[in-house]
Amino acid sequence: MRVGVVLGTGHGENGTTGALVDDLLARVRTHTPVEVDLVRTDELALGPSCPACLACMTAGEQACPNADNAQPARALMDAADLVVFATPVHSFTLSATMKRFVDHFAYLIHRPRYFGTPAVLLSTAAGAGHDAALGYLQTAIRRWGFHTVGQLGVNGPGLQKAPYRAKVDQALDELAASAVKAVEDGVEPTPTTSDLIGFRVARLLVESSRDEGPVDAAYWDERGWFDADWFTDAKVPRLPNALAGFVEGRIRKGIASGSAKPYRG
Ligand SMILES: Cc1cc2nc3c(=O)[nH]c(=O)nc-3n(C[C@H](O)[C@H](O)[C@H](O)COP(=O)(O)O)c2cc1C
């Protein structure tokens, strides 16, 4: 099995998050031989942040000023049977370099490509913040096509205590088993209401930006997505799809008439 690891910490493989990734990979190896590709988001030379030029969307990902430096991460994801995204919690969310990595692949929201590839999400913290870090990662990578088969947020200092360590070990055993099973089964999950709304919102974005650049729309044209309800042949559940259609109608109306309300929390 080929596992790609995206490691979002300056402490690298010797830090708390890196050690957790190792613990998971050791368990995956008890099921099947594993080949690992790893990128450290701190070491990807992606500048202080995404340049926000939107060239990746309008002209294609190769037009990003940092395209060559982002390529190892792209190659890793392209080749992987399973991807592990791992981040420390920084100020109640993912690390800045992990976020910078995500931003450099924003074009995948418009041109998703990883349907059928399972992902595992890991985070470590000294206290709290796993919910925001892992929740954000789950949402972001789903838009790229990946589906999360398991996640684990661990308290680093807590690992010194045997009862907590035992619970983490058990969770890692379960996570490794479900990740291996997901790869072996190769079954793509049935799209949820949220997935189906995501599909329709992406379609809306691509449709409305056709004039700014043909790349996104050509990608959708090639795949027949403008006339579809979902990105793949997976069975689309009827009721959630109807709900997604209703939400899309409301969004379209809100945009066309200006009746959409600003977000007030
Ligand atoms: C800038 C910064 C912000 C942090 N913010 C949080 C936080 O909000 N919540 C928390 O529980 N731990 C926080 N931590 C602690 C790290 O999440 C924790 O030490 C983590 O396990 C480090 O993983 P690493 O060794 O892989 O980098 C923070 C650490 C740093 C450096």
Image (cartoon, rainbow, N blue to C red):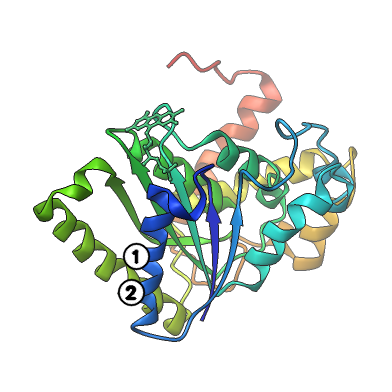
Looking at the image, residue 47 sits to the left or right of residue 170; the answer is right
Looking at the image, residue 112 sits to the left or right of residue 264; the answer is right
- Is the residue marked by circle 1 packed among few (<14), some (14-19), or many (20+) residues within 10 Å? some
Query: Visible in this render: residue 1?
Result: yes
Q: Position of residue 194 (x, y in %)?
A: 46, 48
Residue pointed to by mark 2? 27
Q: Position of residue 33 (x, y in %)?
A: 46, 86
Q: Which quadrant does the C terminus fall into? A: top left
Looking at the image, residue 252 sits to the left or right of residue 206; the answer is left
Q: CA distance from mark 2 to mark 1?
A: 7 Å
Disc 2 vs disc 1: Cβ atoms closer than 8 Å?
A: yes
- Is the residue marked by circle 2 packed among few (<14), some (14-19), or many (20+) residues within 10 Å? some
Against 42, is 152 above or below? below
Q: Position of residue 164 (x, y in %)?
A: 14, 51
Q: Which mark is residue 23?
A: 1
Query: Visible in this render: residue 243?
Result: no
Looking at this view, name the residue that lies furthest to the left.
Answer: 163
- 124, 142: nearer the viewer: 124
Amino acid type at circle 2 is Arg
